[in-house]
């Protein structure tokens, strides 16, 4: 028999065992191929109207994916190789040279990977149309995508995976080469020692995690502060998670053993001891899975939340359908004509908004940061109560305002979450060329009334005071339009943007805000979800393997239990419990990490302040738990089959 | 007297097609409640196999086995588990201790399965380990024990739940004479005080002399039987040795 045919025969024998690994690896090929195909797809490129991030996003995602797949394959490979030490030792004893064994394993890996790669590319190509349509649906485009076989995408996928496969195949070869025969036979015998519970290390784990959580929530003034905080948080959470698995689990299990009434009841004594024995070998895997879960959930949460909040975000950035600074009659009328000509989007309001721009400062510079004054533009935009009434009518705002003479009503600055009491703590000083006024804040408007531009500080004052200010300062005029169906005004909005002087007039449209946001966050969501799925499939399959390896070595123990009168049902229940511990802990930790971090980030990052997280976080967490549950059920079913039939 | 074990025409073959070996030819066996039956015979004669069949760990190729009136063959797995747990104590030749559990946990397992309250459970463990002199070993794991210590642990586990039927496969094989006597005395006590029925496979004529009846197996069939009756133990012991010398095949090597 040639080495090659032995390799083929081995693979057939092992196929059932490795099925999950093949599926996960194939899945990652499919997703990578999809990313690459979409990157090369002219249909997709043509349907993306505004976003400039598509290529970068997909490239970054592909890179992360590759890095991950590499680690996954490397890990699985060394795991399998170690599992097959005995087989290798047997070949060695039979006089097969190590070189030949190594070659055999090399071929085995090569053949399997090539099959998986080919199948992955095939499936990826078949599904690329579906994935493309899904992406476009997320982007709010109705365009059709044709079925294409992209040669360059196939080449890209093949090359990248060929390199990975080659490297991991060589690794398999080298692993065998380094084993000593005696080690090979002792592979399984190494007595698993019972880990000790060190309260000190458990305490350290708690401290590290707490530190990580605190640092992720610290506010920052500069980028280097941010990097430092996140660096500390990363190290704290990573090490903390590791130590947590290393000690706290042992600690908990030991605690469970102390509760004799429970521990000495049914199979609890067996299940708890098994877990305790196994903990040491599982720490690394569980840590990685918890962290990856946290990362995946975090990415999905953020991307999905932004996507979910995009409409609201666009409404805040651009409360009117169109808005620009008056540039004289010719330009203004041209704009008016174009908007009026769009019969599909009837104009519901066309108003003039006079605004006074003034310099200013506040007493403690919290709601009005000093850097506002460093801008070229005068930072405070002032609107009269009457004008506000006009705006409120056009935008159907319910709130009425009525500031007294020395008062200002603030419009909440975007990307902040200050409350009225924060405003009330400060006094605003308006500095006009010849005089200044000191005003106190009497009210806060949550609804936005002007398009966003930096600095973003808008107040409403009473008409009398406005009149006084107007005498001392000049006024600018905004022209604002509200139309029906403003999220689909692609042609009109684009035509306006292309007008001469549009930039100078600071022309904004709701459509552009809405669409750019939708495309950026849509692609982000798409990528995060699919990356998450790959991570999940891979980590799920690693847990599956670990559990099944344990099942094989537990087989004897369960046979003994059966001999002393334990029923199959009880064994099944014990397996369910043990696996729940192994699956549940990293999931629980991953979810906790992700929620803590999302929560902290949503408070710290201005562009996340107004994002609604509750629904998306619930949704992605539920999805994650469900897929995880699938792996759990798969694992306990197989486990049960191995030890209980 | 109730019949506890009744085996009829029991036959057991091992292997498949090409290489079939006969472990048991044709065994008929009746054990009454409260009996202490010894089984002797050369190594490989099918003694362990017989015990496994009675405990329903294995199934006979032909013939039937009734335990306490019910046919093992028609019992479902739940009923069999219940029988093993509630009525049976099995002292395995290869101990069958769980390596992930301490000595104490191994011993208390049958009580834990029966959901005995902790206080009583602790008490029973205390009692039995005291008797077998393994109390100092309670926190140790099986891999830290000698053969004799493992055997005493296995014995403790087999009898801690006070089963009504005890199957012991060479229970004294790894024990020094003092420990062996202790164990045999305990078994006798269970037999006499609790009316437990005992089946004990042994190589050792001294151990067999504790029994009320000894069966001799050779080549998978019952060769002969000795009943103690009113015979004093010393005399019974000598009778057993006589049969063994006729039986040959090294069954009495140990002595
Ligand atoms: N599981 C088995 N598979 C195949 N043969 C077996 C098995 N168990 C026992 N045997 C064979 O059956 C015969 C009786 O074995 P056993 O009952 O263990 O003998 P004893 O306990 O009297 O020494 C032996 O020849 C043994 O090799
Ligand atoms: Mg035997």
Image (spheres, helix red, strand yellow):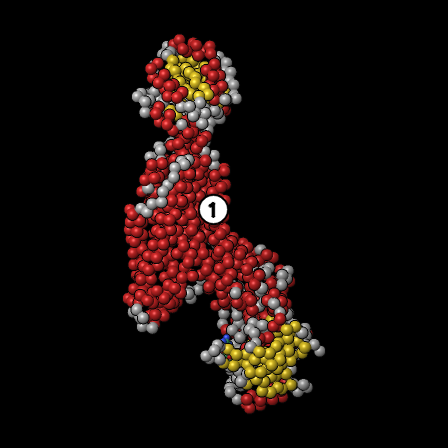
Instruction: Check disc 1 and report its element: helix, strand or loop.
Output: helix
Q: Is residue B219 above or below residue B119?
A: below
- Residue drawn at x 31%, y 61% is A106
Q: Chain of mark 1?
A: A
Hey, which quadrant is residue A46 in on the image? top left
Pointer 1 residue: A624
| Residue at figure coordinates x 52%, y 89% from the top left | B248
Please tell me which residue is depicted at 28% across the width and 46% down the height of the picture.
A152
The structure residue drawn at horizontal position 40% and vertical position 61%, both measured from the top left corner, is: A15
Q: Residue A262, how many percent across, how many down? A: 59, 56
Q: Is residue A194 visible?
A: no
Q: Tell whether B145 sits left or right of A9.
A: right
Q: Position of residue A41 (x, y in %)?
A: 33, 42
Residue A269 higher or lower than A498, as above or below: below
Q: Callout 1: few (<14), some (14-19), or many (20+) C-alpha neighbours within 10 Å?
A: many
* Residue at far right of view: B1
Q: x, y (%) of residue B107? A: 57, 66
Q: Is residue A408 above or below residue B72?
A: above
Is residue B253 something that shows in the picture?
A: yes
Q: Nearer the viewer, residue A417 or B235?
A: A417
Q: Is residue A325 above or below residue A641?
A: above
* Front in this rendered view, residue A150 or B56: A150
């Amino acid at each position: 028999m040639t080495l090659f045919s032995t390799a083929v025969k081995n693979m057939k024998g092992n196929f059932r065992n490795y099925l999950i690994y093949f599926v996960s690896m194939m899945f990652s090929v499919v997703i990578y191929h999809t990313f690459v195909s979409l990157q090369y797809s002219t249909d997709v490129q043509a349907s993306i109207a505004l976003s400039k991030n598509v290529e970068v996003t997909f490239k970054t995602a592909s890179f992360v994916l590759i890095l991950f797949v590499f680690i996954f394959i490397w890990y699985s490979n060394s795991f399998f190789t170690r599992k097959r030490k005995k087989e290798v030792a047997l070949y060695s004893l039979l006089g097969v040279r190590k070189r030949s064994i190594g070659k055999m394993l090399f071929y085995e890996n090569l053949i399997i990977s090539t099959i998986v790669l080919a199948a992955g590319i095939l499936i990826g190509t078949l599904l690329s149309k579906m994935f493309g349509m899904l992406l476009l649906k997320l982007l709010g485009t109705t365009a059709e995508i044709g079925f294409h076989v992209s040669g360059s995408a196939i080449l890209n996928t093949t090359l990248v995976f060929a390199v990975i496969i080659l490297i991991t195949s060589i690794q398999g070869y080298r692993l065998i080469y380094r084993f000593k025969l005696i080690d090979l036979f002792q592979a399984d015998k190494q007595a698993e020692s019972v880990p000790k519970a060190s309260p000190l290390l458990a305490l350290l784990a708690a401290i590290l995690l707490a530190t990580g959580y605190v640092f992720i929530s610290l506010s920052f003034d500069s980028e280097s502060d941010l990097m430092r905080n996140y660096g500390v948080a990363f190290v704290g959470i990573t090490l903390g998670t590791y130590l947590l698995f290393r000690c706290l689990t042992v600690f908990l299990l030991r605690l469970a053993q102390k509760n004799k009434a429970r521990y000495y009841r049914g199979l609890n004594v067996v299940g708890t001891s098994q877990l305790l024995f196994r903990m040491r070998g599982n720490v690394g895997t569980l840590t990685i899975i918890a962290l990856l879960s946290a990362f995946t959930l975090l990415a999905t949460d953020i991307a999905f939340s932004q996507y979910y909040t995009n409409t609201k975000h666009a409404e805040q950035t651009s409360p009117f359908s169109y808005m620009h600074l008056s540039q004289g009659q010719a330009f203004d009328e041209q704009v008016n004509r174009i908007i009026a000509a769009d019969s599909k989007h009837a104009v519901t309001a066309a108003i003039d908004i006079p605004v006074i721009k003034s310099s200013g400062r506040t007493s403690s510079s919290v709601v009005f940061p000093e850097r506002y004054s460093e801008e070229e533009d005068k930072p405070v935009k002032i609107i009269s109560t009457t004008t506000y009434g006009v705006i409120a009518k056009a935008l159907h705002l319910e709130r009425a305002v009525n500031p007294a003479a020395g008062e200002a009503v603030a419009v909440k600055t975007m990307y902040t979450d200050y409350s009225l009491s924060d405003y009330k703590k400060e006094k605003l000083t308006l500095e006009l060329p010849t005089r200044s006024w000191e005003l106190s804040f009497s009210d806060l408007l949550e609804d936005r009334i002007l398009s966003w531009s930096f600095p973003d500080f808008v107040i409403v004052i009473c008409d009398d005071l406005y009149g006084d200010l107007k005498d001392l300062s000049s006024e600018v005029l905004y022209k604002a339009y509200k139309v029906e169906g403003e999220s689909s005004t692609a042609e009109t909005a684009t035509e306006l943007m292309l007008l001469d002087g549009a930039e100078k007039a600071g022309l904004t449209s709701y459509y552009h805000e809405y669409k750019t946001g939708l495309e950026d966050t849509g692609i982000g969501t798409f990528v995060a979800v699919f990356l998450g799925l790959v991570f999940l499939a891979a980590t799920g399959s690693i847990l599956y393997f670990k559990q099944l390896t344990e099942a094989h070595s537990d087989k004897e123990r369960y046979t003994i239990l059966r001999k002393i009168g334990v029923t199959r049902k009880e064994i099944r229940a014990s397996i369910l419990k043990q696996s729940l511990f192994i699956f549940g802990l990293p999931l629980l930790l991953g979810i906790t990490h992700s929620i803590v971090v999302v929560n902290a980030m949503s408070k710290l990052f201005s562009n996340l302040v107004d994002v609604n997280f509750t629904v998306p976080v619930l949704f992605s967490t539920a999805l994650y738990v469900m897929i995880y549950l699938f792996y759990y059920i798969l694992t306990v079913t197989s486990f049960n089959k191995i030890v209980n039939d | 007297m109730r019949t506890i074990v009744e085996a009829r025409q029991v036959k057991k073959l091992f292997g498949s097609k090409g290489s079939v070996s006969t472990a048991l030819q044709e065994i008929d066996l009746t054990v009454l409640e409260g009996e202490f039956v010894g089984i002797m015979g050369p190594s490989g004669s099918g003694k362990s196999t017989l015990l496994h069949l009675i405990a329903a760990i294995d199934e006979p190729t032909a013939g039937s086995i009734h335990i306490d009136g019910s046919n093992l063959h028609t019992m479902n797995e739940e009923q069999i588990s219940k029988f093993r747990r509630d009525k049976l104590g099995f002292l395995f030749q290869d101990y069958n201790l769980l390596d992930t559990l301490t000595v104490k946990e191994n011993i208390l397992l049958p009580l834990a399965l029966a959901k005995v309250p902790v206080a009583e459970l602790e008490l029973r463990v205390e009692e039995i380990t005291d008797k077998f002199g393994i109390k100092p070993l309670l926190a140790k794991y099986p891999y830290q024990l000698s053969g004799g210590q493992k055997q005493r642990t296995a014995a403790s586990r087999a009898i801690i739940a006070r089963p009504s039927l005890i199957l012991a496969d060479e229970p004294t094989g790894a024990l020094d004479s003092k420990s062996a006597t202790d164990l045999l005395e305990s078994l006798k006590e269970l037999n006499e005080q609790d009316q437990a029925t005992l089946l004990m496979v042994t190589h050792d004529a001294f151990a067999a002399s504790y029994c009320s009846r000894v069966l001799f197996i050779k080549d998978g069939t019952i060769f002969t039987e000795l009943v103690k009756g009113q015979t004093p133990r010393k005399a019974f012991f000598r009778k057993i040795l006589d049969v063994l010398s006729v039986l040959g095949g090294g069954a009495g090597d140990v002595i």
